Structures are given as C-alpha cells and as structure tokens.
Image (spheres, coloured by chain):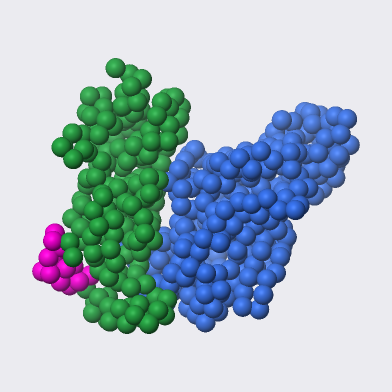
Chain colours: A green, B blue
Amino acid sequence: MNSKLTRRRFIKGVIFSGAAATTGAGVYLANAQNGAGTAERLISLNINGRTRPIDVMPSETLAYTLRYKLDLTGTKIGCNRGECGACTVLIDGVANYACSVLTHNVKDKAVVSIEGIKSADGTLHAVQQAFINENSPQCGFCTPGQVMSAVALLSSNPRPTREEVRAGLSGNLCRCGAYEHYINGVLRASGQIA
Amino acid sequence: MPSHDVMPNMELYQPVQVEDALAIADRLAERGWLVGGGQDTYGWLKDRAKSADALIDLSAIESLRGIRETADGIEIGALTTLTEVATSDLIRGSYSLLADAASVVASPQIRNIGTLGGNVSQDVRCWYYRRGLSCYRAGGNLCYADTPQGMNREHALFDQSRCVAAGASDTAPALVALDASMVIQNLDGERVIAASEFFVGPANDIENTTVLRPGDILTSVRIPYTWANAEFYWEKVADRNVWDFSLVNVAAAFKITDGQIKDSRIVVGAVQTTPRRLNEVENAIRGNSRNADTAEAVKELSTTGARTLAHNGFKVSLMQNLVKRAIIA
C-alpha cells in the first residue's frame, strides 16, 4: 500500500463520502469478489505518475476525486458541466474535462493534473513559465485548465500557428478575457516568440 | 436551481463484452442508463432532472470502437469518439461531410470523449425540459416553450406535436445525407435501421428521440459507398463557435454529371426534433447546375410548412440562406 495513504486518511475518505459508502461499500466489494459486474469501489489510480489506492463512489467524477479525496486542488471546478474548461486534465495524454469523466473510467489510464507537469526538480513546465513571462493569467482561476490544454496541444503539435493555438484552447473559457495573452504564452512556449 | 457537485449514488456496471452489456441492459431495462462518453448523461443526473438506478458504462467495450472499411463502405463503432471521426483519414478522404460535422461539435475536450453513438442518441435541447419540468416530453401535459412568454428562440420550425424542442446533433443530419444505417443489438439479435428512420419526432413518440428502447444498444453506424467522394457542403450556425448547439445546420451531398446535379441529399438540422431531409428541394434542383439561380429558385420551397414560434422566426431565413449556400458552393 502506498505509504502516503495512511489507514487514517483512507478511513477519512470513506467517512467523507458519507452515506453512499456505508450503504454501498459492502455490496460492491462483495460483487467484485464474485465478478457480478458492478464496479468495485476500492481501486488504484495512476495520478501524476504515482499509483494510489482509493475508495471511489460509482458515480463520482474525476474532478471530485482529485480535489476532495486526493487534495489535488489545482484542478478547478468552474461550471461542473463541461462548459468552462477549468477542470481540464490529461487522460492518457488527451485533454478532458475532469468534471465530466467518471473516476471509474480512468482506472487503467494515466491521469496528469496541473500538479504533475513540473519537473522532478521543481522546474516549471515550459507552458507555465511562458504564461508567467507573458502575464497570461489575470484572476488565474481558468489558468490550470489553460495550461493543460496547451500542454496537450504542444505534445501533438509542437509549433502551432496562432489559429491552431486558438482552436486548441477553444474549450477553455477565460472570463477575464485574457485569451490573446494565453495564445502569446503558448507561442512563446513553442519557441515562436522569444 | 441548486447546483450539485456530485451525481446521486447509483450502481455502476462496466462490462467489457457487448454480450454482457446486452444482458445487463435487458435485465435492468428502464432502471439502467447506457453511458458512452457521458457528455449528455452527466448533466441530466447532476441536475436531478432524470435519474437511473444504475449506469451501464460501455466505454470499456473495445469492439464498439474504431472505423473499418467494409465491402460496400465503412462501419464506425458507436463508441468511436468525435475527435476520431473528425480526424480519420478514411472518413476525411471519402465522407468528409461527416468529419466536418463531427469537427464542430461542442468543444475539443468534449469531442475527445464524446462518441458518435452518443451524439446521435442525445436528447433534445429545451431548457424547460432539461430543467426537469413536467412538460409533454417528460410525461406531463404542457409545453412551457410554446407559450406567449416562453423562451423559444432555439426551438423547432417543423413537425411540432405538443413538444417544440429541436434536435441538437450535428452528426445526425450528415449521417442521414450519407444514407447511413444504424446497427442496433438487443438480446433477440441485431437489426439495421436507416438513419432517416432511426430518429423519431414527437408525433410518433414524444418521450424518445430515437427508436432505441430499453435493452437496445446502438453498436455501430454503417455508411454505404453510395455518396463516397460526392461534392459535400456542411455548415453550422450557432451563437458561439465553441460549445454551442446549432441554431440551424445543413448537410448536403451532390452527385454532378456534366455540370448538372444528378442526385442530391439536403438535410437540415436543429429545425425539428429529427434531421429534416428536403426531398422536394432535391427533386427541384435535379438536372440544374449548382449556381445562384438554382438556389434562388428553391428558396421558398426549402421552408414550406414552417410554423414559427414567438422568437424563432429568424430561423426561416437562416435556413433558406444555408440551403442556398449549400446549393451554390
């Protein structure tokens, strides 16, 4: 078992998920043992390169799990309806809204959140550094999602045109209207603006 | 309306074989809710506007994914994502109408997980219905949109029958234009239904937008070679370029011989619950060239029978203009 997830934290997590856990956990665990098909609540997740065991409700979204079970609060929940992009994370390298994915859907996948993109030595990702240099964020609430969409874009298209950046970040709202600054940031991160 | 961070607790089934999914769907019937990418599902459940005892998550069934060539066209697994449809070389090459339609659905992140099967099976857009009000479509006996004070700017022009909600799918009109057919399985076997018959309007069934019934799973979409490499036209008009649903869209295919239209398909979306194929326009333009004169001649014909509501009159001229552009371009 991962040393970071102590017995105390695990129990805390179960209590936090409330009545659902007390009424449902036994059934799901029992079902998982005899293979009846319903999802087992105790699963392990690959988040930011680490495998963590965790108790997950059947209808829990990934955004909920990240923020309220794993304390990875860099992923923001804006609309919680897949209409703003603040919760964007990478699932197997693909940008997705964490509010609109069941955590049980990513059991066998690699999830990367905003906490997982800096280097091991703490160096910021090129997109993060470029956003700082370009003063891209204003209030900053949408920034983690903007960063994740930009990282996904640059991994498939390392030197995008301005129009391609616009399309790549089009699933992320910024209510401050700092879009041009984010686009400049992505172009800087791709080495096209010095 | 309260905002809920979480969905109600439900059972979750995650079968990896179609056979298992069919058995679960059959056993649970109305108590089960099929989920592909979930992009229409989760809003309903978070809002408590609809509920289910159990989710049947189809996303782990690999056999429902992917695009393959068949003897007479292509077959697209129902769980193939819209991004995959929009970027597939096979589809871009010969059936670009569908790729173009899929490429403007919602937002990049939603296309990355939303599926073709889900896009055609999604429910209508009407904020009264989606708010959970007991309207006709929800089993009640009132339409909140078709009233003097009702907000119905996005609603239907045609085939209203108590409900005036419009269908929201961008890929549906493209599939009808391509003469696609839908492969549906249940425990009794498989049936193949033409896309034009797959979608149903409120006059025939007010509580469903497709022929899918409890126990059915849409497993794939087949596109025959009939319209491969035809001249295509796709256009979507919405208030915003991203996320937004079509106010009106048009999917058209033309076979041209010696500069004349030999055959065509013109299908308009978001003007009624189902994709609206304009058979009379197709007949009227046969034998003519794709030009402004031909387009202008069928302008009125294209919207014959429209019944406007208080706020959606603009859709008539929008639809006429889109049909004209489809014919000209």
Outermost residue on the top side: it is A194
Q: Residue at x 48, y 75 (%)?
A: B32
Residue A151 as seen in the image, left or right of residue B216: left
Q: Position of residue B306 (x, y in %)?
A: 70, 50
Q: Is B194 included in the stretch rendered in magenta? A: no
**Which quarter shows the C terminus of chain A?**
top left
For this rendering, which residue is in front, B59 or B243? B59
Q: Is residue A146 visible from the viewing direction of this image?
A: no
Q: Which residues are magenta?
A: A3-17
Lateral position of residue B220 relative to residue A74, left or right: right
Left or right: where B246 falls relative to B189: left
Can you give x and y, in whole percent of width and height, for residue B253 in the image? 74, 41
Look at the picture and state if A179 lies above or below B45: above
Q: Quadrant of residue A106?
A: bottom left
Q: Residue at x 24, y 65 (%)?
A: A54
Nearer-the-camera pick, B2 or A171: A171
- Majority SS type along the magenta span: helix
Residue A14 among magenta residues: yes
| Quarter-of-image position of residue B6 | bottom left
Residue B314 percent coordinates (x, y): 61, 42
Q: Is residue A167 visible?
A: yes
Residue A141: quadrant of the picture = top left
How far from the left and from the top, in percent, is residue B115?
Answer: 52, 54
Q: Residue at x 62, y 60 (%)?
A: B220
Q: Residue furthest front?
A: A1
The N terminus of chain A lies in quadrant: bottom left
Seen from the viewer's position, the closer of residues B272 and B327 is: B327
Indicate whether A163 appears above or below B183. above
Residue drawn at point x = 21 percent, y = 34 percent? A124
